[in-house]
Amino acid sequence: MANNIIDVRNISFKYGDANKNAINDLSFSIDEGEWVSIIGKNGSGKTTLINLLDGLIKSNNGDIIVDGLKISNKNLDNIRDKIGIVFQNPANQFVASTVKEDVAFGLENRQYDISKMHKIVDNSLKEVDMLKYKDSNPTKLSGGQQQRVALAGVIAILPKIIILDESTSMLDPKAKKIIINLINKLRIKNKLTVLSITHDMNEILYSDRVLLLKDGNLIKNISPLKLFNELDDVENYGLEIPFSEKLRLQLKKNGFNVGNNYINEEEIVKWITQYYSKM
Amino acid sequence: MDNSVLFKNVIYKYQMNTPFQHTALNNINLKIKAGSFVSIVGKTGSGKSTLVKHINALLKPNSGTINVGNFTINSKTNNKNLKKLRRKVGMVFQFPEQQLFANTVKEDIAFGPLNFGYEEDKIPDIVEHVSKIVGIDKDLLNKSPFDLSGGQQRRVAIADVLATNPEILILDEPTAGLDPEGKKFIMNLINDLNKYQNITIILVSHQMDDVAKYSDEVIVMQDGNLVKQCYPDELFANTNLLKKYDLQMPVSVKINSMLNERGFKLNDLHLDEDELINAIINKLKEC
């Protein structure tokens, strides 16, 4: 059986003078190597949850255990070495004037030996196919390239967990695909666990599991294929229903037997044309 | 007065007379009718943003002219005389919330009109009016814009621009980074501004589904050239054109062409997703 890498036990969190919890008695666990999507509307608690996992804020109740370590002030540095976060807007994250210096920033912070640093930076940039840009100014790169540099900075510190905080939401569809494929490749190669906050259905479909949050509560812990079938008010959760799924649900409503699981565009087109040719 | 936008032989080069010189706009001719909803599409780097920056003279052409109503912009246009033009042409940049700066939402919205010399006693009405249009609650007006959610900040940034009462509104990727609900809200808002307030909309977007759904006309840019200006149906009905210009197919077009290839032929092209679903179901029910 796979190892448990994140264990969240009955955590709650309330912001300052708010009148209700932003996170409300949340419990779940994630296995090493899993890809889990966290979904929910703005204000559902997704970002608060990430901040709790990274120890940026402290829960009022409950425990969070990351790779065997319970989060506390004492071991925050240890925990943060295990977690790398790629944020939504890469332009806000760059600190250096060249790509290589930017990737090295996390290593410098952790006081890596300079002689090793060059090699780590080069390797990380190679992994994301950005080595030839190592002397470029990061602000001159396209959004997709910037996110690849941000990802290189994250993998340079060899995290066990990568958190994607809407990392692809600003990218065009092509760049999105490149990033997601890249992360999946790295996940398999380095046995990474991926936790992704997203509204993007293609990204959700990559995941093994989906955690659906609403008002700080965990509403569903479910396979992405079952998601739309089990929610009749999907739009209330800040999700865009893919067209193939809209079509499947409407066909079902009209008495056609299209099954209960998510099917993609290819599959639904095949279903329709087969049904039609049998008539 | 007619507020059409007219480009005549517009050429713009970045970093002129340096080894990095790069032609961003290559002899552009176009007309955007007053009151229309026009989308500008094309790959990253094709010249879309450069093009729209010429409409309020943020960039001036190296050669050629741009007419916006009775304004003429050319290489010699003086920056001093642009206030009226900038009032007429509102510009919502990418991630406009990054430009919020005031202590309160109210002050942020009031900044533009004050800057353009509106009388101070008229400001509260303007703030109330535009915040209502963009769906910002009254009780948010005294809050810091930085305490709002991303979606709310985007709306305030649009209110900032609307506050100066533009007749032409340019929006560069206005829904990027928003959740589906926020996207829908912004697109409906833009559409309402066009349909009910007769504001000309010039939308720069990669979201072909939105472009197909809302625009009266589409302008396609490729490598600094205007390669096509047409009705959305003409562009989206032609999958070869979409491939040629490296444009994402709207999902309705994609499904339609996949069905077509497998012998399931619908009579009409339905760009609207719900219409397409109905057409498919009706055809299946017939058999």
Image (tube, coloured by chain):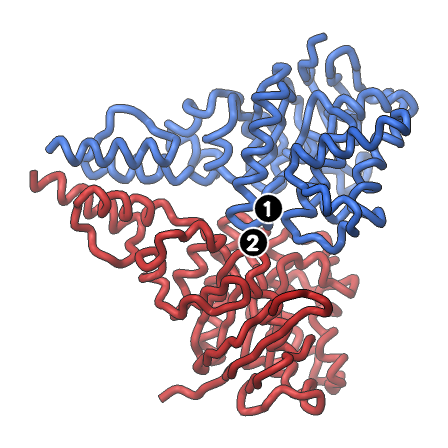
Chain colours: A red, B blue
Left or right relative to B47: residue A211: left
Residue B55 got which mark? none
Give how far across and how far down residue A92 sits, in percent.
72, 59
User: Can the viewer see residue B152 in this picture?
Assistant: yes
Give how far across and how far down residue B20 sits, in percent.
76, 42
Kindly indicate the quadrant of the structure image that contains residue B260.
top left
Residue beneath the point at 64% across and 64% down: A149
Give how far across and how far down residue A168 sits, in percent.
55, 57
Residue B176 got which mark? 1
Q: Residue furthest front?
A: A19
Residue A169 got which mark? 2
* Chain where mark 2 sits: A
Q: CA distance from mark 1 to mark 2?
A: 7 Å
Tell me whether the residue at label 1 lies in contact with that at label 2, contact meaning CB atoms closer than 8 angstroms.
yes
Tag 2: amino acid = Ser
Give how far across and how far down residue B198 sits, in percent.
62, 18
Q: B259 or A46, which lies in front?
A: A46
Quarter of the figure that contains the C terminus of chain A: top left
Residue beneath the point at 79% across and 26% down: B57
Residue beneath the point at 65% across and 81% down: A80
